[in-house]
């Protein structure tokens, strides 16, 4: 399947093909939900998505992935080195680092603004020193670089039927909604890394602080105050999904099934958290295989319908990007 995707994208240079294949493996290993949704995109657009998310996974692995290839003392220098390689790659289009080579090529082909990558690296750097966020506004500044920019980077790849600036706020909101979902699901795991990604004022409104979370995690005993705080966090996240939802109809029709499937699957994680009684400190809530399969099957049906419509001139929409070729020029 990788060769078919690369051929469809017009990527023929061997080292570049290897770089994209490496990003695809990173995305498949670390981002199972989004990787599944990406399979619903036209083949020629998938390598770019793998490059963007593969690079993000690579940087995140430096910061705090369990079993990271970088000891704690080496993470800041490693992240700084990656930032320099990224800046050089974006300027010149080449790099000896495979993930940088692929993401720089994707940025050039699709005209992705370099500031999004700079903002992403800023948020990754803050993860080395920031362990909690007093307010949602503080968290939102972090999430702009760690999540919103991912939605903004994706827009040129997905294509839109409206001007990109009209779709951009919804794309940014969807990236934030996905990340807030992960934050809620992973409260216990993040706490073990010394971090709390839920706003301190939201927790405090229910009498929850780090010490109570740590006690509950260590003892396995649940507390109704924590449950109430997690319910509040879930409602906050649902609100961001509502902000993102209008953007789905603004995408190129052949891209909508992918993003709609990701939207449904990520939001289903919130349902799983609720069904588990918001016991996020004690177990990781997951969406059942049956629900994942049913959602993916529905996405496939929408893909088929979109591709049939795209074969007819009347079904084509403005703003759809041309097929990718190997060189941006």
Image (tube, rainbow, N blue to C red):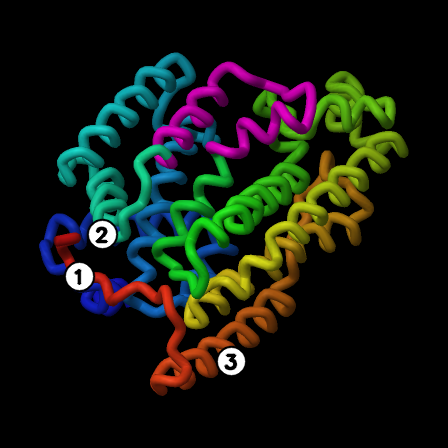
Question: Spatial distance from mark 3 to mark 1, Cα to Cα?
Answer: 28 Å
Q: Is mark 2 on a helix, strand or loop?
A: helix
Question: Spatial distance from mark 3 to mark 2, Cα to Cα?
Answer: 29 Å
Q: Mark 3 points at which residue?
A: 301
Mark 3 packing: few (<14 Cα in 10 Å), some, or many (20+)? few
Q: What element carries label 1?
A: loop
Across and down, in percent, residue 98 comes to 21, 41
Q: Looking at the figure, which quarter contains the N terminus?
A: bottom left
Residue bounds of the magenta highlight: 116-145
Q: Identify the residue at image location x=43%, y=30%.
A: 67
Magenta stretch encompasses residue 135: yes
Q: Mark 2 points at which residue?
A: 109
Across and down, in percent, residue 317 comes to 40, 73
Across and down, in percent, residue 25 comes to 33, 51
Q: Which of marks 1 and 2 is nearer the N terminus?
A: 2
Q: Nearer the viewer, residue 35 or 175?
A: 175
Question: Spatial distance from mark 1 to mark 2, Cα to Cα?
Answer: 8 Å
Q: Earlier in the sequence, mark 3 or mark 1?
A: 3
Q: Which of 293 and 168 is in front in this view?
A: 168
Magenta stretch encompasses residue 269: no
Across and down, in percent, residue 297 comes to 54, 75
Q: Identify the residue at image location x=84%, y=25%.
A: 205
Q: Which of 323 and 83 is in front in this view?
A: 323
Q: With respect to residue 175, does 78 lie above or below?
A: above
Please tell me in which quadrant of the rendered image residue 294 appears.
bottom right
Q: Name the residue under label 1.
A: 325
Contact check, label 1 and label 2, Cβ < 8 Å? yes
224 sits to left or right of 74: right
Task: Tell us which disc is closer to us: 3 or 2.
Answer: 2
Q: Which of marks 3 and 2 is nearer the N terminus?
A: 2
């Amino acid at each position: 399947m990788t060769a078919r995707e690369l051929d469809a994208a017009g990527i023929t240079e061997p080292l570049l093909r290897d770089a994209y294949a490496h990003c695809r493996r990173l995305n498949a290993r670390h981002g199972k939900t989004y990787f599944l949704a990406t399979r619903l995109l036209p083949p020629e657009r998938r390598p770019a998505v793998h490059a963007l998310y593969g690079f993000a996974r690579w940087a995140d692995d430096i910061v705090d992935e369990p079993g990271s290839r970088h000891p704690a003392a080496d993470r800041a220098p490693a992240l700084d080195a990656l930032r320099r390689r990224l800046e050089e790659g974006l300027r010149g289009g080449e790099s000896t680092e495979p993930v940088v080579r692929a993401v720089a090529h994707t940025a050039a082909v699709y005209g992705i603004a370099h500031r999004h990558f700079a903002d992403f690296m800023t948020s990754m750097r803050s993860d080395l020193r920031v362990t909690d966020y007093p307010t949602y506004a503080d968290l939102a500044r972090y999430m702009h670089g760690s999540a919103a920019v991912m939605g903004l980077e994706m827009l040129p790849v997905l294509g839109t039927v409206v001007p990109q600036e009209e779709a951009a706020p919804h794309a940014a909101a969807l990236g934030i909604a996905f990340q807030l979902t992960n934050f809620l699901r992973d409260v216990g795991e993040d706490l073990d890394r010394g971090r709390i990604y839920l706003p301190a004022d939201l927790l405090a409104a229910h009498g929850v602080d780090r010490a109570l979370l740590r006690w509950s995690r260590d003892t396995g005993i649940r507390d109704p105050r924590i449950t109430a705080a997690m319910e509040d966090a879930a409602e906050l996240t649902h609100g961001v999904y509502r902000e993102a939802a209008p953007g789905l109809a603004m995408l190129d029709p052949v891209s909508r099934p992918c993003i709609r499937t990701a939207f449904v699957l990520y939001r289903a994680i919130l349902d799983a958290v609720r069904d588990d009684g918001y016991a996020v400190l004690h177990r990781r809530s997951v969406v059942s295989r049956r629900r994942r399969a049913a959602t993916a099957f529905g996405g496939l049906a929408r893909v088929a319908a979109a591709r049939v419509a795209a074969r007819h001139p009347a079904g084509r929409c403005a703003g759809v990007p041309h097929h990718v070729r190997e060189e941006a020029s």
